[in-house]
Amino acid sequence: MSGATDTDVTILAETFRLLGDPTRLKVLLACLNEPVAVTDIARRIEASPSLVSHHLRLLRAARLVTGERRNKQVFYEAADEHVRHMLADMLAHSEEEAEG
């Protein structure tokens, strides 16, 4: 297990459980490359702003996204490069599987 503790494994399992929800994953993917407002995320993934906000609260609690207030709106983006790389790599992997 390459030195992963039980706590590490539990956190990873919870992270993957969170990302197992298709809407939540779409929310995260929508703010992967740049900060995006809740209303723009909702429009991109064709969901209500309240549903997007609910998913963002969970993603923020899991430290997968961060939010920055600008005037009256909060803009969300992936928390760091680890999150971006993990999802980009998984997308590339799924595209390889689809092609092969």
Image: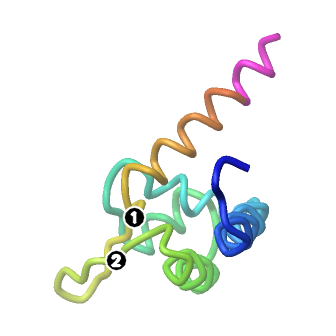
Residue shown at 73% from the left, 30% from the top: 94
Residue shown at 42% from the left, 60% from the top: 78
Drawn side of residue 27 relative to residue 24, left or right: left
Question: Which residue is more in the foreground, 98 or 50?
Answer: 98
Residues rendered magenta in the picture: 94-100
Drawn side of residue 74 relative to residue 45, left or right: left
Residue 71, compared with residue 46, is above or below; it is below
Q: Earlier in the sequence, mark 2 or mark 1?
A: 2
Question: Which residue is more in the foreground, 53 or 49?
Answer: 53
In the picture, the disc for residue 79 is: 1
Residue shown at 48% from the left, 74% from the top: 63
Disc 2 is placed on an element classified as strand
Q: Amino acid at mark 1?
A: Ala
Drawn side of residue 93 relative to residue 34, left or right: right
Q: Amino acid at mark 2?
A: Gly
Q: Quadrant of the C terminus?
A: top right
